[in-house]
Image: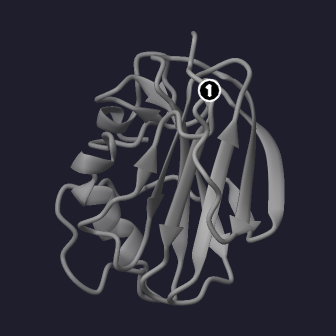
Amino acid sequence: MNDEFVNESRQPQIAGLMRPWRLVALLTLVTRPLTAQGKAPHPVPSVPRAQPAPKGTIAVGQTVRDSLTRRDPLLPADSTYAQQWRLGATHAGETVTIDLVSDVFDAYVFLLGPGLERERPQDDDSGGSCNARLTARLPQTGDYYVVVTSSDKFRTGAFALSVTAGAKPQSLAPCNR
């Protein structure tokens, strides 16, 4: 593995990946699929050749339980670990609410995909008590990716990720960590 894409503990990292307002390279990668030969149909600037595959797929109406670990890709600009989850079976105009709940870290979630290049939906504490809740209208049919991470540097631990149809209200419960 190329050393520029490995952190000091020799773990893979997503080079150049930062919080959503600086995600141009990853957005380009996610929204431009590879050809059968493994090449991008258009030039992809500043993106390493070996991006981590999604951790798994989550569908509307489903909840997955997993953990952020030190083996997950590191977002070097923020020093946080992250996982990508493919959001399957979506349709243009559909509204979804993504909840990320953790008792051990300050949950942070963002959504990547077609038509979201400018908006870049993201959330930190709208789920209440340091949990993330993000409601988004999907502008196009296509592959979307939910990125699970933490607002806390180098934090790891268990989480539950849920996607439901429609909107949910934000919680007013403060984050006290």
Residue 35 sits above or below residue 152 on the image: below
Which amino acid, mark 1? Ala
Give percent across and percent down for residue 68: 66, 31
Q: Image quarter for residue 126?
A: top right
Quadrant of the frame with the C terminus: top right
Residue 109 falls left or right of residue 66: left
Residue 105 sits above or below residue 28 on the image: above
- Nearer-the-camera pick, 137 or 102: 137
Q: Image quarter for residue 116?
A: bottom left
Give percent across and percent down for residue 174: 56, 21
Residue shown at 43% from the left, 36% from the top: 13
Quadrant of the frame with the N terminus: top left
Residue shown at 60% from the left, 23% from the top: 70
Would you name the residue on which mark 1 appears? 173
Residue 161 falls left or right of residue 78: right
Q: How many marks?
A: 1
Q: Image quarter for residue 105?
A: top right
Give percent across and percent down for residue 71: 62, 30
